[in-house]
Amino acid sequence: MKNRFSLLSLLWTLLIFSGCSSRQVLSSDYNVIPLPVSISLQEEGTPFVLKPSTVVYCPEGDSLLLKNAELLTGYVARQVGFELRITHDDQARNIIRLGSGLQAENAEAYTLVVTPQAVEIEGASAAGTFYGVQTLRKSLPVTDGKVRIALAPVRIEDAPRFSYRGLHLDVARHMFPVEFIKKYIDLLALHNMNMFHWHLTDDQGWRIEIKRYPRLTEVGGWRKATLVSHWEKPDHKYDETPYGGYYTQDEIRDIVRYAADRHVEIVPEIDLPGHMLAALAAYPELGCTGGPYETGTRWGVYDDVLCAGKEEVYEFLEGVFSEIVALFPGRYIHIGGDECPKTRWKSCPDCQAFIRSHGIVSQGKRTREEQLQSYMMSQISDFLGKHGRKVIGWDEILEGGGVKSATIMSWRGTQGGVDAARNGWDAIMVPYQYLYLDYAQSRDEGEPLSIGGYLPLSKVYSYEPLSGELASNPEMGAHVIGVQGNLWTEYFRTAELVEYMAIPRVDAVSEIQWTRPERKNYEKFLGRLNRMRALYDRLGYGYASHGFDEGQSGDNQDM
């Protein structure tokens, strides 16, 4: 089929070229990332010719499709070199029509049909139409505008495998300008991802303005130094330079709007009760010892956490989350729950008195302190539930018995997701062995300093979220709602390093999220991946160039 399509493309190109000698004619290629469910090439018919006079139609009064149309014209202008006009006249000639009336069970489904006269993108929602737009743009060559482009007649039917398709970015360790956050969101959109997990607070920095508690950013937003070598080495070094900053609420609102235009929901994370040293530095009365504390300068886990035995801590958290809810209209709020030592709680009079007064007891292997953490997480979950939000937590929240209605983010492996599904809770699979993009992309001597380990592209691509019990038990498997790639930034101070660590592994993550396993093939993926390089270059993204050829080594057993 491939050879036959190539011959047809050549014949169509020659045919068009004979009538358009003033312009070169290039062909489209529908083998994009992530790979659609079905690509049915039509063996008969001439191609649709994309040219400067082509128009983009959307129904008048439909603001969501109008935004899709505006984005499409921008994509084409940057990628192909000429700008298309938007029209509300669906009878115009040489037209790309956008619609959202597709009848499908999956609200993100779309069809893309190319005929000699038109390109029809019909989504089951505006989001589905947007993913059709992404497939169209990735089908186009990257060129300079002095061309016409032949789109072969085709029918593409497509819908995502998982409803939650996420990419994470930690800005607590190192933060990045607003314009880069938008560029990162554009990277999600390019790959049909719909969830941006924004890790905003940690021991080393509080990055979001909370008006009720201004010291969170005035004090907790700054640390006195930053590690410049691996933190576990005994001779680790600091730069001794103060580091800090935060996003204002106006900047947050702007980013939220930008993401929504691209059908990306932002999932903010305020990590608790551990990873709160920056907050304790700002408000030491929230800790068990009363301090003094200082914003963390090393990476890793700290014993000082929020005091779960003080009522003012719960008041503080409700005050913070009241502002978070007002800023982020999405369905989910991430409340962390990972890596919380119970050292302080075991010796804290307030925590122990709280345990007794609330009748918190150990249950089996679960200690009273683990049950105390579940109590705290449940209180915040209930508070957010009253505001119409669902909570996500790292898989450690299962250790105290879990939090009612929480979605579990399984990062320490896959067992957390299995346990959650077995108990009827939703899960998002983010096992670090496959999906933590802060591990090295290669063993090259020039590889940037990272957390350690080696996670090649081939191993990322090999991950299958529904295996074992999740595959054999469909009822359990249905609770796995998605997959996410995580990028922590302890060792990545610049946006260029973030892009280097993300790309091209983000392409592999997107196929895990979107493409059915029977459609996946690593060697064919590498061929499609190499077409992405020109687009990354045109869009100004950096990347690990060796990653595009990494599949030759076959070495993927280090993590």
Image (cartoon, rainbow, N blue to C red):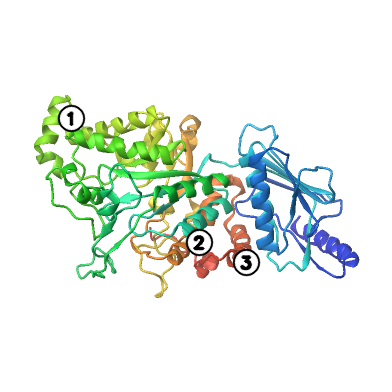
Q: Residues within 10 Å of mark 1 (few under 14, many from 20)?
A: some
CA separation, marks 1 and 3?
A: 58 Å
**Residue 503: image tag:** 2
Instruction: Identify the secondary structure beneath mark 3.
Output: helix
Mark 2 residue crowding within 10 angstroms, few (<14) / some (14–19) / many (20+): many
Q: Secondary structure at mark 2?
A: loop
Q: Separation of disc 2 and disc 1 at Cα?
A: 46 Å
Tell me the kind of residue under disc 2. Answer: Ile
| Nearer to me, 197 or 86 | 86
Quarter of the rendering containing residue 171: bottom left
Q: Is residue 138 left or right of residue 429?
A: right
Residue 423 seen: no
Q: Quadrant of residue 143?
A: bottom right
Is 241 placed left or right of 508 in the picture?
Answer: left
The residue singled out by tag 1 in the image is 362
Q: SS of the residue at dot 1?
A: loop
Q: Is residue 551 left or right of residue 146?
A: left
Task: Say whether disc 3 or disc 2 marks the residue closer to the N-terminus.
Answer: 2
Please state the horizontal and vertical placement of residue 547, each as a whole percent of the image.
51, 66
Amino acid type, label 1? Ser
| Residue 294, position as x, y percentages in the image | 19, 55
In this picture, is 272 found above or below 386? below
Single out the residue that lies furthest toward the bottom: 445
Front position in the image: 97 or 475 = 97
Q: Amino acid at mark 3?
A: Ala
Position of 384 relative to 236 (above/below)? above
